[in-house]
Every structure is written in structure tokens, then in C-alpha cells.
């Protein structure tokens, strides 16, 4: 890959600014925790695993910037920064998961000198990043076996390298299949309102040398009805204990269409996206974003002044519509209460 999504560079968190793709490839340097929080909120870095990695490096930045030499004061000083990072976006559990991992590491070194605590936070952030990259590779290999030797795969939003610390989830499955010699053509839903499919998946597939065609979101149904889609693979922001899946708004209708047309609907995600503490999809918090993302996309007003707009960023697909959940530890199938718990126990 000749780009990166997020990295730690000697006390600076550097991000590829995804709000500017595909027109410009600009890297953003975050020199404070507030910079990282703002970048996560505005979607300069986005995608569940990627915001987990960015959150962990944000914690490392908080530790790096603290000037105290007193271990107890150190923890007290960075704790509000960790909370800010954890709450930057609510739906993707990977962000809370990553910050909670950092907190546990801090608990385990609480009586150690500040430089040791600081190093422990950075080491944990690097570990989270590396493990995510490894998970992407492994889940890609598992998922590739589910794809046809030649055919079309429809995906929604961007669940690729841009959304993770590695080569992606849904797109990693496609990359692994292509590397295994399968001839796959990607249909990328444009993904209103922020166009992660049209802007990001199309850009990324181009960079990875995978053929891609962009569709308006509302074209997916007729393509499926004509038998032009062999399977659907999407990522996820949070998977409840019963296998209900939260992902970018517009995912649920795709799953309904897939069922109607007898096309398998697969979800690819690392186990860090599985939240056994949330029993069903009804318990997943759904982020509501600003109405102007709908009314005024990229600065162009498309609705009359004064008309309200709804902008839920995610929806929940019930487990009954999910053919399989592909993780780095293997492929889970229904009943998901059992298969997901078993995957996490192994
Ligand atoms: O709002 P976004 O762009 O962060 O939403 C991202 C998605 O919905 C992805 O499909 C999901 O995070 C999985 S990324 C591997």
C-alpha cells in the first residue's frame, strides 16, 4: 500500500484526511488530544477499527503531553482526555474498546514512574494497531473462501484500509480473494450523505488495483433483481451478542434486498467489533449527525432553506439476515449467541 490511514510519528498522530479524498491526498498532523477528537468527529479518520487505533494513539498523545512527574497526578491529568477520546463517536465500539484497553494497562502500571507509564500507553497503542493489521489479514483469508471464483461483490460505505489499521474488513476479504486468483468486480454504493463509497472505496480499490463501479445507493435493488450481484460484504461498527449488526446507514435495506433475492449477505469485522455486553441491536447507540450533512453536501445546498433533515449515521441489521460474520478467528454462523461467544472464548 502506498498510503497510510493513521500513524504515530514521534509525538504526533498523523492521519490521511479522508474528508479531502479523492481530490487531495493530504496528511493531517494532530498535536493535541483535541486535534484527534476533532479529526474523529469530522471523519478525517473514520471506520470503526481506524478510530480505535486513532483513539489509542490519542491516549498516547495525552500521556506524551503530560508534564507531571507524579504518577498519581499523571493518571488524574490524562483521565479526562481518555474520556473525551472515548466519547468522540458513540456507535463504533472499537473506540471505547481501545480506550478501555489503555485504561487497563494504566491500572497495571499505576505505581510505576511516569516515563514507564507513558511508554506503556504508547506500547499498547502500537499493539492495538499491529493486532488490527494482523486481524485484517486473517479475516480477509477466511472471508475470501466465501466469495465466488469469478463474480461481483457489492459493498457499502468504506470498510477498507482507510477504515482500519490494516487492509480493511469487507475490502480485505475482496483483496484476499483477488490475491487467491478470484476474478472479483466490486460494486461500491455511493453511501449518502458523506459518500464514503463513491469517494473512499472507489479511490482505495483504484489504488489496490481492484476493478470497481460506483452505484447510487438506490440502484442496488434493481441490480440485485437482475441477478447482477453475487454477494454483499460489509463491515460493522458494533456487533451485539446476538449477532445484530450496526453499520453505516443504508446497510439494513441491503440485507433485506439480499434476502429477497437469495444473495448471501456477509459481515466482516475483527473481534474488537463484537460487544457481548450489548445483548441485541436495540442496545446499540446510533449516532445522529448534523442535518447539514444531508441538506448541504460538500457545501452545496440541495434542500429548501428551513426544511429539517434526519441524519442517523448507522442502522442495525437483524441477525436473521446475516449469512455469516467473518472475523480473524474464523467464520461465525447462526445461532450467533453461541458462535460469537465461542469465537471470543477461544
Ligand atoms: O461514519 P463512518 O465512515 O465511520 O462509518 C464507517 C462504517 O460504517 C464502516 O462500514 C464500519 O466502520 C466498518 S469499517 C471496517
Image: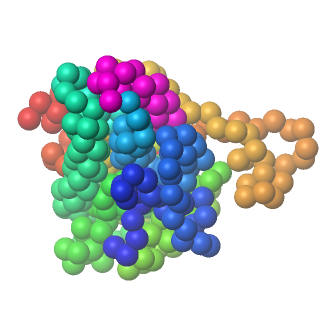
Could you tell me residue 306's position as x and y percent?
90, 38
Q: Nearer the viewer, residue 304 or 165?
A: 165
> Quick one: which residue is furthest to the left in this view?
346
Main SS type for the magenta part? Answer: helix
Residues shaded magenta: 69-92
Residue 118 lies in quadrant: top left
Q: Is residue 297 above or below residue 176?
A: above
Q: Is residue 224 visible?
A: no
Residue 57 lies in quadrant: top left
Q: Is residue 345 visible?
A: yes
Could you tell me residue 259's position as x and y percent?
41, 46
Q: Is 76 a magenta residue?
A: yes
Q: Residue at x 19, y 74 (%)?
A: 180
Q: Is 273 a magenta residue?
A: no
Could you tell me residue 241's position as x and y percent?
29, 26
Q: Is residue 265 above or below residue 59?
A: below
Residue 318 lies in quadrant: top left
Q: Quadrant of the N terminus?
A: bottom left
Q: Nearer the viewer, residue 338 or 2?
A: 2
Q: Nearer the viewer, residue 346 or 18?
A: 18
Q: Is residue 134 left or right of residue 53?
A: left
Q: Residue at x 41, y 35 (%)?
A: 66
> Quick one: which residue is furthest to the front in this view?
69
Q: Is residue 307 left or right of residue 226?
A: right
Q: Is residue 208 above or below residue 198?
A: below
Q: How many marks?
A: 0
Could you tell me residue 139's position as x and y percent?
22, 54
Q: Quadrant of the C terminus?
A: top left
Q: Residue at x 19, y 27 (%)?
A: 112
Q: Residue at x 30, y 59 (%)?
A: 166
Amino acid at each position: 500500500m502506498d498510503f497510510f490511514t493513521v500513524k504515530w510519528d514521534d509525538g504526533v498522530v498523523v492521519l490521511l484526511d479522508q474528508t479531502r479524498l479523492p481530490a487531495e491526498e493530504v496528511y493531517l498532523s494532530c498535536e493535541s488530544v483535541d486535534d484527534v477528537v476533532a479529526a474523529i468527529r469530522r471523519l478525517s479518520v473514520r471506520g470503526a477499527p481506524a478510530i480505535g487505533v486513532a483513539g489509542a494513539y490519542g491516549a498516547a498523545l495525552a500521556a506524551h503531553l503530560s508534564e507531571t512527574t507524579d504518577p498519581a497526578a499523571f493518571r488524574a491529568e490524562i483521565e479526562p482526555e481518555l474520556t473525551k477520546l472515548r466519547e468522540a463517536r458513540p456507535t463504533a465500539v472499537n473506540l471505547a474498546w481501545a480506550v478501555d484497553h489503555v485504561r487497563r494497562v494504566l491500572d497495571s502500571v499505576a505505581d510505576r514512574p511516569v516515563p514507564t507509564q507513558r511508554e506503556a500507553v504508547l506500547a499498547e497503542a502500537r499493539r492495538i494497531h499491529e493486532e488490527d493489521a494482523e486481524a485484517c489479514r486473517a479475516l480477509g483469508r477466511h472471508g475470501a473462501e466465501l466469495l465466488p471464483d469469478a463474480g461481483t461483490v457489492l459493498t457499502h460505505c468504506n470498510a477498507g484500509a482507510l477504515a482500519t489499521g490494516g487492509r480493511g474488513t469487507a475490502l480485505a476479504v475482496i483483496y484476499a480473494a483477488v490475491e487467491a486468483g478470484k476474478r472479483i468486480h466490486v460494486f461500491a454504493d455511493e453511501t449518502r450523505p458523506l459518500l464514503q463509497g463513491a469517494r473512499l472505496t472507489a479511490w482505495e480499490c483504484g489504488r489496490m488495483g481492484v476493478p470497481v463501479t460506483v452505484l447510487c445507493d438506490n440502484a442496488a435493488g434493481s441490480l440485485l433483481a437482475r441477478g447482477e450481484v453475487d454477494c454483499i460484504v460489509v463491515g460493522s461498527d458494533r456487533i451485539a451478542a446476538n449477532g445484530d449488526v450496526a453499520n453505516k446507514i443504508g446497510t439494513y435495506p441491503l440485507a433485506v434486498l439480499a434476502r429477497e433475492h437469495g444473495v448471501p449477505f456477509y459481515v466482516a469485522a475483527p473481534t474488537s467489533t463484537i460487544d457481548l455486553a450489548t445483548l441485541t441491536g436495540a442496545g446499540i447507540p446510533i449516532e445522529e449527525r448534523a442535518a447539514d450533512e444531508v441538506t448541504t453536501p460538500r457545501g452545496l445546498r440541495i434542500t429548501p432553506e428551513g426544511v429539517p433533515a434526519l441524519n442517523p449515521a448507522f442502522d442495525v441489521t437483524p441477525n436473521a439476515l446475516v449469512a455469516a460474520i467473518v472475523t480473524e478467528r474464523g467464520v461465525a454462523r447462526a445461532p450467533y449467541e453461541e458462535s460469537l461467544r465461542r469465537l471470543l472464548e477461544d
